[in-house]
Image: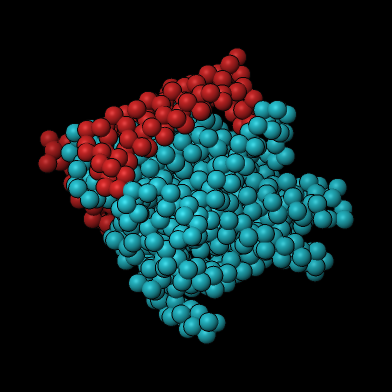
Amino acid sequence: MIETALTDLWYGFSVALEPHNILWCFVGVLVGNMVGVLPGMGPVATISILLPLTFGMKPVAAILMLAGVYYGAQYGGAICSILLNLPCHPPHAVTCLDGYPLTKQGKGGTALGITVIGSFIGASFGITEMIFLAPLLVSLALKFGPSEVCSLMLLGLLAGSTLARGSPLKGVAMTVLGLIIGICGADIETGTPRLTFGIMELYDGVEIVALALGLFGIAEFMKSVNQNVTFDTKYANVKMRDMWPSGADIKKSIFPWIRGTLIGSLCALIPGTGPTIASFVSYATEKKISRTPERFGMGAIEGVACPEASTHSSVQGDFIPTMSLGIPGDTVMALLLGALMIQGIVPGPQLISQHPDIFWGLIASFWIGNIMLVVLNVPMIGLWVKLLAVPYKYLYPSALFFVCIGVYGANNDMFQVGLTLVIGMFGYILLLLGFHPAPILLGFVLGPRFEENFRRAMLISRGDIWVFVDIKNHPISTLFVGLSALLIGVQIVLWLRRSKFGPRVPAVPATPSEAEV
Amino acid sequence: MIGLFRLKRDYYAGALMILLGLIAAHDGTNYQIGTLQHMGPGYFPIALGILLVFLGMLIAGTASTEDAEASALPHAEWRGWLCIIAGPAAFILLGRYGGMLPATFACVFIASLGDRQSTLKGAAILATGVTVFGVLLFHYLLKIAMPVLTWGGV
């Protein structure tokens, strides 16, 4: 098994090292690194904006670039947290707690150095995990019938909506809304136009670009305009030679790195728990097992090393269910799947065998991209910090133009720009009402496939709804349904306890901006 | 006061979901529903619509002032909101009847006026810069099908 994996990986490198692929990978990580530093622009908005540009590209290059934005942004987000105390990117919010005190003590460079090394360790482990686990999952998933696929999707949707930020009930409502929006357009079996309200342009359904840019572009701009975040760049001058951590610091960080990596890779495997939860769990663990927990929050290097390693290992691990099962764990993954679907590639367990260039090329590009990022991060930090001085008042109007031209360019259709605007306004109303619109995209991407498989499962079972929990003939499906029920049960118990004992005091600082988790 | 809004917010949130669910379910009744074994095109919209109505009721029913996520009501930012909406609206109109050049300029110019610190001059400079860059990139490099300058539409 190891041998075939290595041969495939070798093939992947030959794909990823093709000049134009490596170029797009570089563009992706560079853009990602930059927007990761910028407060008010996250990977979700950036990937949405870049999505229309990928339509003309080859599928491999498109996915390499978009994925590069995602993990590149993770490297940038840490800079923002450590040097400026800005928890603008949820996975790195917890890094502020010890990163910023270190910066104030003049050890910001060391913290960044430790972060970069930890990130690389975490990412490497996550990639290795993907190399061996994804084919294993695929061989299992290829045996799935429609009922298994359906209950797996149910589990993924429920986990994605209840474990994310905000009220779980509202999360589920958003997922259902996403499923409904996904229905819009011609029915796959009969061709009947549904939920189009007589509008001809909607017969092809809602474009993913319009939905994503409305929700994560326009709605976010409406939320962030004139909410000026003030920050202090006085500690942000880091010289390159400060970034080499001392031997003592490295020694202190080795075990936190390893623990963080393991926690992150575990979190990646549980659907719905992405890098944010991984980093919070690993920080809490590290504090708990430390002999000197009182140092945490005052500038303990372990408090930077552990969550950062776990974020990166989880970010890479996130790709496992997405690429092997076709079930995205969060918004970014849903967008990447959307990008593949636009290219005419059907996500699911058959992806690895049908498009090995995409799968193995992507994995190889992870290595290349991460090495690029380690090299990039060191000299670029000074430049990124200067970029922070670019005020939001220049950022959002330019981004708004990119939104408009991007949506238009996707189909040369002005109607879609109008649709984006309407979705954006609607998305802002949702934000005001306390909804997080991220699960909409999850439901939207999975919706059509969910319906198709559900209908097929019902056809096969002759309309017997209990086929999903038929433990004798469909044990895997039963397991997924059981886990889904468990998720709902846990939420109900938590809700009952909350209403009995009052709200829990949040242990970590709230994260402003960004509608993502 | 804010506590009251938060309570009301959940009522509005629930009501919105109920409304959307009803729309979906009502639309579904226009098509053949079919049976569980042979589902028609109307089956899923109706089922999901009813589910959304149910969730909306739950959201409104469990409304509490002690929302774990204590986000205060942002004060109305009419200037920003209007400009952000007007920017793309101008892009749509001018893009159809005037071409990429005026559309881009108007979109960026109007949108940037939404920031309270922006000035007419600053907005014009930014809009000019983005227009030059945008037309070069999207018209000449990426060849998006939109004329640079036209009159009266295509």
A287, A186: nearer the viewer: A186
Q: Position of residue B108 (x, y in %)?
A: 35, 37
Q: Position of residue A177 (x, y in %)?
A: 40, 37
Instruction: Decide if residue B64 is on the left or right side of residue A259.
Output: left
Which residue is located at x 34 percent, y 65 percent?
A59
Which residue is located at x 32 percent, y 32 percent?
B24
Image coloring type:
by chain
Which residue is located at x 52 percent, y 85 percent?
A3
Q: How many marks?
A: 0
Can residue A463 be seen here?
yes
Q: Residue furthest right?
A: A291
Position of residue A354 relative to residue B141, above or below, is below
Which residue is located at x 22 percent, y 37 percent?
B31
Instruction: Decide if residue A415 is on the left or right side of residue B46.
Output: left
Instruction: Decide if residue A248 is on the left or right side of residue A236.
Output: right
Q: Position of residue A262 (x, y in %)?
A: 67, 63
* Residue A186 figure quarter: top left
Position of residue A354 relative to residue A294, above or below, is below
Position of residue A100 relative to residue B27, above or below, is below
Position of residue A392 relative to residue B3, above or below, is below
For chain A, give the colour. Answer: cyan
Chain represented in red: B
Q: Position of residue A356 (x, y in %)?
A: 39, 74
Can residue A339 be seen here?
no
Instruction: Decide if residue A310 is on the left or right side of residue A340.
Output: right
